[in-house]
Amino acid sequence: MKFTLLHSDPKSKARAGSVTTDHGEIQTPIFMPVGTAGTVKAVHQRELKEDVEAQIILGNTYHLYLRPGLEILEKAGGLHKFNGWDRPILTDSGGYQVFSLAGTRKINEEGVVFKSHIDGSKHQFTPENVMDIQRSIGADIIMAFDECTPYPCEFGYARKSMEMTHRWLKRCIDRFDSTEGKYGYHQSLFPIVQGSVYPDLRKQSAEFIASCDREGNAIGGLSVGEPAEMMYEMTEQVTDILPSAKPRYLMGVGTPANILECIALGVDMFDCVMPTRNARNGMLFTSEGILNMRNEKWKDDFSPIDPTIGGYVSTFYSKAYLRHLTISKEILAAQIASIHNLSFYLWLVKEARKHIIEGDFSVWKDQMVKKVSTRL
Amino acid sequence: MKFTLLHSDPKSKARAGSVTTDHGEIQTPIFMPVGTAGTVKAVHQRELKEDVEAQIILGNTYHLYLRPGLEILEKAGGLHKFNGWDRPILTDSGGYQVFSLAGTRKINEEGVVFKSHIDGSKHQFTPENVMDIQRSIGADIIMAFDECTPYPCEFGYARKSMEMTHRWLKRCIDRFDSTEGKYGYHQSLFPIVQGSVYPDLRKQSAEFIASCDREGNAIGGLSVGEPAEMMYEMTEQVTDILPSAKPRYLMGVGTPANILECIALGVDMFDCVMPTRNARNGMLFTSEGILNMRNEKWKDDFSPIDPTIGGYVSTFYSKAYLRHLTISKEILAAQIASIHNLSFYLWLVKEARKHIIEGDFSVWKDQMVKKVSTRL
């Protein structure tokens, strides 16, 4: 994997770069649509490429491990072959879902024992087997196994958890470095900075993560309920420490405004379920602001959803039609809104990149943050 | 509207023809995907054209009248403008849904008073206002308001109902012929043969319908629970009477085998929710037979869904991947299965048409009926 830094914004920490993987290039800053169980919900693979113009998607280790399971994924030749997505894939470590979805779970130094939310069956994730599982899934970028602390989180717990995440990281690295990819292409391991909302811990964690010298680095444990300002503060502190020659991935963030602000703080990669999840609830992110498609005001607005961002879905369908589909609980509503929201997120980071390269990112960003946060 | 009969099969009553409307040509025999509330469920309009290759779709008057309602549809300039489908549209009369979906309903000579299944509000359908409503929706082909008798149905009720349907037809024709299309293109009215499963009534009804001399004719009240052989018998009797110079539409039919058998009996147009509804339940119709996508046997079958019929969805996605999506209740499962099933239905009638023109329809039909009925 190769990261090339193309341009740095003089008035912020924003950067434009590119990440080269064996499945193709990713232009950063980038947003990665979440493909939980091997599918970005309600979006065809062809649409992800041609309409959304996604460059990399995310897979959830927890979900994929439980269903379809490693046997099927290995027989298929990995997730790329299984779902037909031939561009880069990043998988999370499964830790976040174990804590948020699984039934009874027990965490200790060895790892986490949990019960499947599907059938109650018992499983264990350890730093070692989570590396093996992600090798089998065949992601291009593999995440270290960590504990994502909740918010709020007591200092004592946050410190102990961070220290264990660091010990787990060493075990991840040992396992990762002593194994090989199963399908003939390169896989990279990204470690994750933790430390909750405590500057001291974040500093300590970022320094430790940086010292591991992997191909890219991630920031976890944010966007879990803390105020946005606190998230920005932690992010800024961490990006000051993480090496600039490597891509920085802020996990699970966020709203369009969050993404713009964190690009300004030196983040290169983002993922979030918000564009797809909110789409299924009738919330649209557009270049003019946020639309609630259940709102009566759209019932006879026959203008296209968002002509500015272009593309079939956003220019072909009208607000009135989408409102009708939303109110009627039609599947097509979820399809249109999901493609649109993802297209908008990808359009937004592409625009950000353009403005970083052109040198007027900061001015553009401040205007855009206001626009995309407006409720229409 | 113009119907051209291109070819008649020498060994059956099958015919190949074409219907020309102001929204384009329809090659018959044809299957019409059902677009209940202005959307063929889980399928984008672009996919309907480019993947399914649908030539005409159906809209349900009952649903469209309740939601989005006539005010919105008229403001939009009709259903074509509202949903972006620019090929022909046929609307049913709303009668079938009033009987199957609405709450308390009361039928008398004047029409039907019913309560909306959405909000319980009270409405009335009469032969006259159903013509007006379909004028407002802007369908290319408008159906007469009829009573679709259930199965089984006593002879006495079937006779009285048929007679009322005939009286309603006269009122439909009076209203239709004294009004005009609202959006500048031609609309045609198709009357409907009723008579339950009674040969005498069917004969009487078909003769009355034929005598009305409209641009096309429909057969209703079948595929409501009666044995297939009975449906074929009634259909054959009716097609013997309905003029050959006009298209014949068999409403609500059916399985792939039903469609092939009824093409052989001289039917030109079909519609059915089966390909889309069954798709959402994991049932796939393919050129090799019927697949239940929940079946364990597909879990590691990485072959494409149905390479014979071609097209993106049927050749790009594997059975194993679709099984995974189906088991995981992912929206994409409904999307893939819906597009595939509709593509298969459209492929089937296209093949039938080809064989009618080539002169070997009967032999091909008998082989195909066996194949498409096999459970794999």
Image (cartoon, coloured by chain):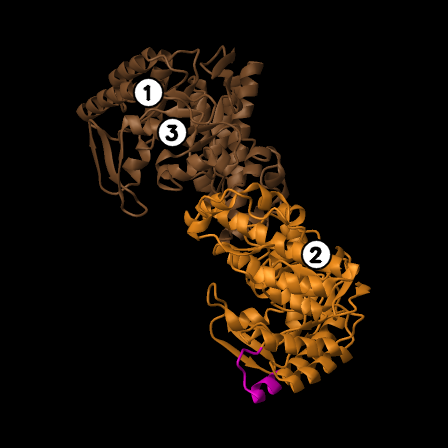
Chain colours: A brown, B orange
The answer to whether A271 is drawn above or below residue B171 in the figure is above
Instruction: Residue A271: tell me if it is visible.
Output: no
Residue B108 picture quarter: bottom right
Q: Chain of mark 1?
A: A
- Whether the magenta-drawn stretch holds residue A289 is answered as no
Measure the alpha-carbon separation of dots 1 and 2: 64 Å
Sequence-first disc among 3 and 1 = 3
- Residue stretch rendered in magenta on the structure: B149-161
Amino acid type, mark 3: Gln
Amino acid type, mark 1: Met
Asked whether the residues under marks 3 and 2 belong to the same chain, the reply is no
Residue corresponding to mark 2: B351
What residue is rendered at 48% in x and 28% in y? A31
Quick check: B260 left or right of A203? right
What residue is rendered at 47% in x and 75% in y? B104
Measure the alpha-carbon separation of dots 3 and 1: 28 Å
Amino acid type, mark 2: Glu
Residue corresponding to mark 1: A234
Quick check: B363 left or right of B277? right
- Residue A156 position in % (x across, y down): 17, 24
Residue corresponding to mark 3: A134
Which of the two residues, A233 or B278, is positioned nearer the viewer here? B278
Which of the two residues, A278 or B266, is positioned nearer the viewer here? B266
Q: Chain of mark 3?
A: A
Quick check: B182 left or right of A366? right
- Residue A139 position in % (x across, y down): 43, 28
Tally of numbered discs: 3
Instruction: Residue A172: tell me if it is visible.
Output: yes
